[in-house]
Image (cartoon, grey):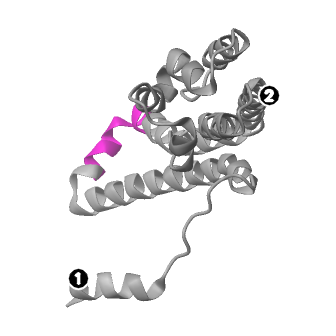
Amino acid sequence: MSGLSSAELVGVRAALSAGASPGAALAEAGHGVLGGVARSVRLGRAVADEAQSVSTGDRGADLLVRALGVAERAGVGGSDAVGQSLRAVRDAAALERLLAVRTAQARGTALLLSAIPAVVWVLLIALDPTALAFYATPLGVGLGLLAVTLGLAGHRWSSRMVRQAQQAAARADPLCPARPPRDPRRAMIVGAPLLA
């Protein structure tokens, strides 16, 4: 997982337990995904101000910075905030593992269905090498290109379906930022010069 690690959270929790303020704990233990926020705090920006516009790319890290910002503004230590963030990171990792397990069969099936036509074609050519002469004709070239195109399209389509199944949990999360709605008028305005 490339996001917030348990080691970073333990470092922040240790600094808070030692009596450091939320800003000092974040500045001291902030590496990896928290590096940019820690740099801003080291340069004098308050954690509460940083929390208002935080966007690290990791929901657990954003949650931690927001919680530490609230703790700093309230004047409390923030150990509870780190504990909640640690639970959130562990839950996210467990969910990712569960989704990987649940979609493993679908990923394997997609790969198998994409590979079977190529394997069968190679076997048929191995059994009768004279069949390769067909692919030297214009009709053979066209059919070969069509077969490759359809195979790649099928692989891409099935991979997209599996990816969407994996992303369903993120879309169901109420804390996940919603995608902006699509505006068909904007698409027509952008696409109109291309058609002209």
Q: Give the range drawn in magenta.
A: 125-134
Q: Quadrant of residue 63?
A: top right
Circle count:
2
From the image, which quarter does the N terminus lie in? top right
Residue 131: image tag: none
Disc with the residue nearer the chain's start (2 vs 1): 2
Q: What residue type is labelled 2?
A: Asp
Q: Does the magenta stretch include residue 7?
A: no
**Mark 1: which secondary structure?**
helix
Crowding at dot 2, Cα within 10 Å, few <14 / some 14-19 / many 20+, comes out as some
Query: Residue 78: percent from the left, percent from the top?
Result: 73, 27
SS assignment for the magenta stretch, majority: helix
| Rendered residue at 74%/30% (across/down) | 76
Q: Name the residue under label 1.
A: 194
Q: What residue type is labelled 1?
A: Leu
> Does residue 167 appear left or right of residue 155 in this picture?
right
Crowding at dot 1, Cα within 10 Å, few <14 / some 14-19 / many 20+, comes out as few
From the image, which quarter does the C terminus lie in? bottom left
Circles 2, 1 touching at the beta carbon (< 8 Å):
no
Q: How far apart are marks 2 and 1 (CA)?
A: 55 Å
**Mark 2: which secondary structure?**
helix
> Does residue 88 appear left or right of residue 45 in this picture?
right
135 shown above or below 97? below
Q: Mark 2 points at which residue?
A: 80
| Rendered residue at 73%/49% (across/down) | 169
118 shown above or below 153? above
